[in-house]
Image (cartoon, grey):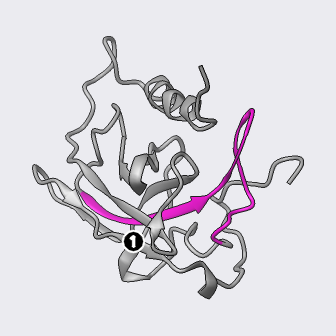
Amino acid sequence: MPHSKNSWLLCLLPLLLASCGSTGPDGPPPPETSQVSGTVMIDGKPAPRGEVVLKLYPKGRELKPGERIPQCIVGPDGEFSFSSYREGDGAEPGEYVLTMEWLRIALMGMFGPDKFLNNFNSPNNEDPRFQVTVVSGEDTVIPTIDINTSTLQKKPMHRYATRAGKGK
């Protein structure tokens, strides 16, 4: 039975998220989170399932060593839902900058270069479409982000960006 080349990545994401961190039966309970979701379109069409990675970075400060950031991979119809501690649990309340990379899928994971030409992979992005406020007890639905690739110009890669793999 044929499987989509992206289906294994979607199955792997919950395992990766669950395996990181100290919460669990022997650890402290995870902090309160609220659901964060939305849709990414590329040139008016849903982003390809499993190829666009989104992350939420704390706004206005650097990451602390070992700090967990909410992240997700675009699913069917360009839709996404962030995970921090458990699949789909969202993000802790706060101010965030959304980053986004359109990556190449390979046998050992996802690799750059970013097909968005590094336009959206920096937590220093000030574009209002990428500013996200998560409020305690409220679901956050990010307005649909539609990227017109013909207007993108190559930018320097941010240090948090996914590096290119072999065989680019």
Which percent across, then down, holds residue 122?
56, 69
**Residue 52 in sight from this viewpoint:** yes
Give, as a three-letter code, the residue at label 1. Answer: Ile
| Dominant secondary structure, magenta | strand
The residue positioned 41% from the left and 47% from the top of the image is 76
In this rendered view, identify the residue nearer to me: 69 or 77.
Answer: 77
Position of the C terminus by quadrant: bottom right
**97 to the left or right of 137:** right
Instruction: Quickly name the residue at label 1.
Output: 145
**28 to the left or right of 164:** left
Residue lying furthest front: 1
- Where is 120 relative to 155, above or below? above
The residue positioned 52% from the left and 75% from the top of the image is 43
Indicate whether residue 112 is drawn in magenta: yes
Kind of element beneath mark 1? strand
Residue lying furthest right: 167
In this rendered view, identify the residue nearer to me: 167 or 140.
Answer: 167
